[in-house]
Image (cartoon, grey):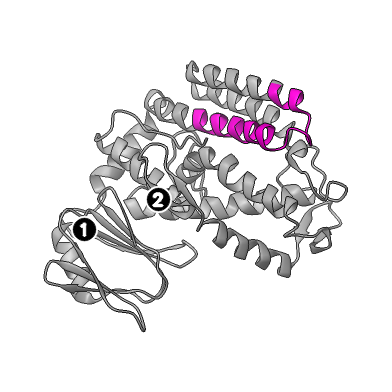
């Protein structure tokens, strides 16, 4: 169990939550019950299927404490809110921001600055960790270009211009991504980003990891009461979780990209687990997909210090914290949205 701000995250498996007076009781088989005070809580997010007592759900609804249920893999299930509190005002303000290009640009700039900054950090980390195995000068040049791109993004005066700067930065970053593959280079070659369909094993892994991340971020947005389908940078499109795509931008490089590099460099995947279809698309077989999913779940357990809150937490909670910070900005509790800046 981890308390971040006024939200409590219950990520211990098979935990059943119940109420005792003004306290939440966490029960697990063959373990002593644990008790935590409910005062000052705004939300409880629980990961797993054991559930919560009707008494606790009723108390949370009455006191305005959002109680959110997720699967152990982070998929959103349901949220219990009281009739007086809900998320109407929060979502109405989200829609107002989305309808205004000026306001949307103000938020989107920070997300894209975070994305470019984190891409640069991945490149810089490789230079520090593997100076004898990579072309340091080449990567340092890319790092400088990405640094310049953050300045351009900060000065963008339209969403279209911001997307242009973001695209140029992505081209720079993926231009050296193959340099970061240190093992299995003969079989896991990367010559550029392609998506629909992915045309090599590296792109297949990236696309799959991005889809996992998008689902995690979408669930986190649901948990704080935001509409994941109404974005600021990514505009409305039927069936697309545009706000989730916005928020995950800053998490792509430090979370998903580094995850893919680890899979390859640590030889956790093998090229035999990929098949090329008649149309050129490369897909993973079922066993490889299961291996990647297991590794993803393990990756989420790694600890990191959040750069804005300066608290240690598991990687799996980062999307939830960023969604919480975005909701606070939209409600007016923060003057600006603080992106996740990985170092």
Q: Which mark is residue 260?
A: none
227 is higher (above) or lower (below) than 22: above
Lower position in the chain sequence, tag 1 or tag 2: 1
Q: Is residue 307 magenta?
A: no
- Residue 42 place in picture, x, y as percent: 22, 53
> In the shown orientation, is residue 297 left or right of residue 141?
left
Q: Secondary structure at mark 1?
A: loop
Q: Badge 2 local density, few (<14 within 10 Å), some, or many (20+)?
A: many
- Residue 91 lies, in percent from the top left, at 30, 44
Q: Which mark is residue 320?
A: 2
Quadrant position of the N terminus in the picture: bottom left
Using the rendered image of the protein, determine whether residue 42 is visible from the camera's viewpoint: yes
> Residue 118 lies in what quarter of the image?
top right
Q: Nearer the viewer, residue 16 or 139?
A: 139
Please say whether residue 197 is visible from this viewpoint. Answer: no
Q: Residues within 10 Å of mark 1 (few under 14, many from 20)?
A: many
Q: Nearer the viewer, residue 244 or 254?
A: 254
- What residue lies at 53% left-to-right and 17% top-to-bottom? 151
Name the side, left or right, on which 98 lies relative to 191.
left
Which quarter of the figure has residue 338? Answer: top left
Q: Main secondary structure of the magenta part?
A: helix
Q: Residue at x 18, y 53 (%)?
A: 85
Instruction: State which quadrant residue 268 falls in.
Output: bottom right
Residue drawn where x is 77% and y is 38% of the image:
178
Asked if residue 267 is positioned above or below residue 59 in the image, the reply reads above
Which residue does the image show at 76% across and 58% down from the upper left? 283
Tell me where the magenta segment starts and ends, as one range. 112-140
Q: Which residue is mark 1?
A: 65
Give the CA separation, mark 1 to mark 2.
16 Å
Q: Position of residue 244 (x, y in %)?
A: 47, 46
- On whether residue 119 falls in the magenta region, the answer is yes
């Amino acid at each position: 169990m981890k308390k971040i701000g006024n939200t409590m995250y219950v990520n211990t498996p098979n935990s059943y939550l119940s109420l005792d007076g003004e306290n939440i009781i966490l029960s697990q088989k063959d373990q002593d019950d644990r008790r935590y005070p409910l005062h000052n809580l705004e939300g409880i997010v629980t990961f797993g299927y054991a559930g919560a007592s009707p008494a606790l759900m009723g108390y949370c609804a009455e006191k305005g404490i959002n109680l959110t249920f997720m699967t152990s893999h982070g998929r959103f299930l349901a949220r219990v809110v009281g009739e007086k509190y809900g998320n109407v005002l929060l979502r109405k303000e989200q829609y107002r921001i989305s309808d205004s290009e000026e306001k949307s640009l103000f938020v989107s700039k920070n997300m894209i600055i975070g994305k470019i900054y984190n891409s640069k950090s991945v490149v810089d980390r490789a230079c520090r960790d593997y100076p004898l195995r990579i072309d340091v000068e080449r990567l340092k040049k890319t790092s400088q270009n990405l640094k310049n791109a953050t300045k351009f993004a900060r000065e963008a005066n339209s969403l279209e211009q911001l997307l242009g700067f973001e695209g140029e930065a992505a081209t720079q970053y993926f231009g050296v991504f193959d340099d970061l593959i240190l093992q299995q280079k003969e079989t896991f070659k990367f010559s550029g980003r392609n998506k629909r369909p992915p045309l090599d094993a590296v792109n297949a892994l990236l696309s799959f990891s991005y889809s996992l991340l998008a689902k995690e971020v979408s669930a986190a947005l649901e948990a704080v009461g935001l509409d994941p389908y109404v974005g600021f940078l990514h505009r409305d499109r039927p069936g697309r979780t545009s706000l989730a795509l916005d928020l995950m931008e800053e998490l792509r490089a430090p979370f998903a990209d580094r995850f893919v590099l680890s899979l390859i460099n640590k030889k956790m995947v093998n090229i035999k687990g990929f098949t090329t279809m008649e149309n050129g698309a490369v897909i993973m077989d079922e066993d490889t997909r299961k291996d990647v999913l297991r590794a993803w779940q393990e990756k989420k357990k790694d600890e990191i210090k959040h750069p804005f809150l300066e608290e240690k937490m598991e990687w799996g909670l980062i999307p939830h914290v960023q969604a919480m910070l975005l909701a606070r900005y939209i409600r007016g509790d923060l003057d600006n949205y603080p992106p996740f800046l990985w170092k």
